[in-house]
Image (cartoon, helix red, strand yellow):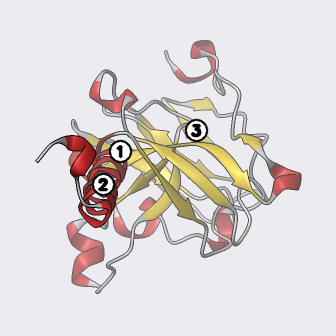
Amino acid sequence: MSEKDENPIQELVKTLASAAILAVGIRACVAEARFIPSESMLPTLEIDDRLIIEKISYRFRKPERGDVVVFSPTDTLKEQNYKEAFIKRVIGIPGDTVEVKNGDVYVNDKLLTEKYILNAPNYKYGPIKVPEGQYLVLGDNRNNSYDSHYWGFVPLKNVIGRATVRFWPPSRLGTLDEKPLYPESETTE
């Protein structure tokens, strides 16, 4: 039987199987779509925003301060029966000392300039040193976010990817942040 004589149903099945394998491969290794279920990242991300989460860059570099990351629940969160991924902003990278006081966030004893938060945090946290291989993450809606200041650090192995592009709603289409958010002089000694 030649290719010309191939059954149309067999051809359709091959095409659909190839498309499914390609889609699963892209989602597992390259990028995936996610939606925002809560107000924890206001004003940067609104409920029902749709995002592209890219998964390639962290194979070549580690998450950086200011990245908006999606991560699977930590062991502490799993103990609290959380199963869905979280999205938060990286504030502390390994070796950083982070403190929240008087409505401001300090990294390595330097005030972090944050133009993206909804309101100044009304809590005190730290100072605490971020361990190797871990990240301190906070929601941009500091006073309404279940984040590292409640449950601790995110291990690198839990990071799924970085939120890069909002594709829905069309009125908010675009990239999330310009780089760099934090000039090195603001956050290092």
Where is residue 17 drawn, in percent x and y? 26, 58
Query: At 32% from the left edge and 78% from the top edge, which residue is drawn?
Result: 83
Of circles 3 and 1, the one toward us is 1
Marks 2 & 1, CB-CB < 8 Å contact: yes
Where is residue 88 drawn, in percent x and y? 52, 55
| Label 1: how many Cα within 10 Å (few below 14, some 14–19, many 20+) | few
- Relative to residue 16, is residue 43 drawn left or right? right
Where is residue 138 drawn, in percent x and y? 53, 55
Give amino acid for label 2: Val
| Label 2: how many Cα within 10 Å (few below 14, some 14–19, many 20+) | few
- Relative to residue 72, is residue 127 drawn left or right? right
Marks 3 & 2, CB-CB < 8 Å contact: no
Residue under label 1? 26
The correct choice, above or below, for 1 with respect to 150 in the image is: above
Depth order, front residue of 64/70: 70
Of circles 3 and 2, the one toward us is 2
Disc number for residue 112: none
Where is residue 119 drawn, in percent x and y? 79, 60
Give amino acid for label 1: Ile
Determine the CA span between mark 3 and mark 1: 38 Å
Lower position in the chain sequence, tag 3 or tag 2: 2
Q: Is residue 86 visible?
A: yes
Residue under label 2? 24
